[in-house]
Image (spheres, rainbow, N blue to C red):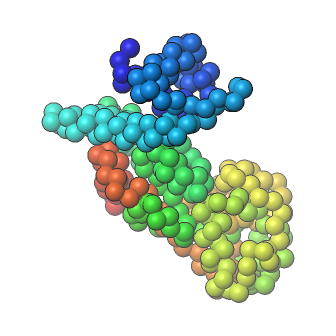
Amino acid sequence: MTFDFRLQVFHTVAKRLNFTRAAKELLITQPAVTKHIHELEQHFKVKLFERNGTHIRLAPAGKRLLEHTEALFAVYRNLEFDMGTLTQGHTGRLMLGGSMTAAPYIIPPILADFHSRYTEVQVSLVSGNTQQIEQALERKEIDLGIVEGHSRNPAIRYTEFLRDEIVLVSNPEHPLARRSSIRPEELARIPLLLREPGSGSLEVLAHALKGVGLKLSQLRKEMQLDSTEMIKSYLLHAPSMAFLSVHAVTKELQNSECVILDVKGLAIERNFYFARLQGEAGALPELFVRFAMHYRDRK
């Protein structure tokens, strides 16, 4: 086995903090994982992991090595891409992260078009709320994120991508569904389904409510759910309402499964952003950003 593979073994163990899971992911045996880690420790003459019974954690030297392996693998991905462009081809692996709105409703159509053009690029997509995606970026588990929200992490560079609108929706049988609008003070009396803390949608809602003199704490929270799909499914069977991205309810609106109610004086608009670490300029992430911008402009 090469030294590079040993670094890959270390990187996988460092991310999972579990030898058994790392072995399954790498398709090798657990003793083989242990052997490669031991050989790395002998090579560098340091302990990479601290063991406490069945649990492990990174030792100081392990944390330092993880930083180097992440940088090294990023260089490898860029090298593979750059050399591929010499033959007018694009190859390599691109790791994307999308917020709970962007991942299911915004990114997949773009990915399908991207894959038809760049068939040799291996793309993976994970989802989470905005806070989780930003944390994944900082841990270098992904190369590029698509997020929303008003907060700004100084370690991350944001590029405006797409406009969105948050709307108040209910099922057609809701007692207020036949009205075209409601007053802000009525909103405080309606059972609402809200997203979880850390959600970009919840953050945008809290910011917008200030404009009509309301706070999140004044809303009648029926439940907090961490998935737009769960919220939509719940709404179909309950006299509740929820603030959702208009992108997330397109099919339901077309099928008359939900309706939109205006809240007088409340307009909730936001942007989706590409999120990259400051100073990072990977070739594949930049290619995807350019492609997605072009896709947006064609629609």
Left or right of 292, for residue 62: right
Q: Nearer the viewer, residue 193 or 37?
A: 37
Q: Where is residue 264 in the image (x, y as percent from the top left)?
A: 67, 84
Q: In which quarter of the image is residue 116?
A: top left
Left or right of 99, for residue 227: right
Q: Nearer the viewer, residue 172 or 12?
A: 12
The image shows residue 280, relative to residue 203, as above or below, that is above
* Quarter of the figure with the N terminus: top left
* Quarter of the figure with the C terminus: bottom left
Q: Which residue is drawn at 44% across and 36% down?
A: 65
Q: In which quarter of the image is residue 67?
A: top left
Residue 272 visible in the picture:
yes
Q: Position of residue 42 (x, y in %)?
A: 45, 21
Q: Residue at x 50, y 64 (%)?
A: 153
Residue 299 visible in the picture:
no
Q: Position of residue 16 (x, y in %)?
A: 58, 33
Q: Residue at x 48, y 50 (%)?
A: 137
Q: Residue at x 73, y 79 (%)?
A: 215
Q: Where is residue 131 in the image (x, y as percent from the top left)?
A: 58, 57
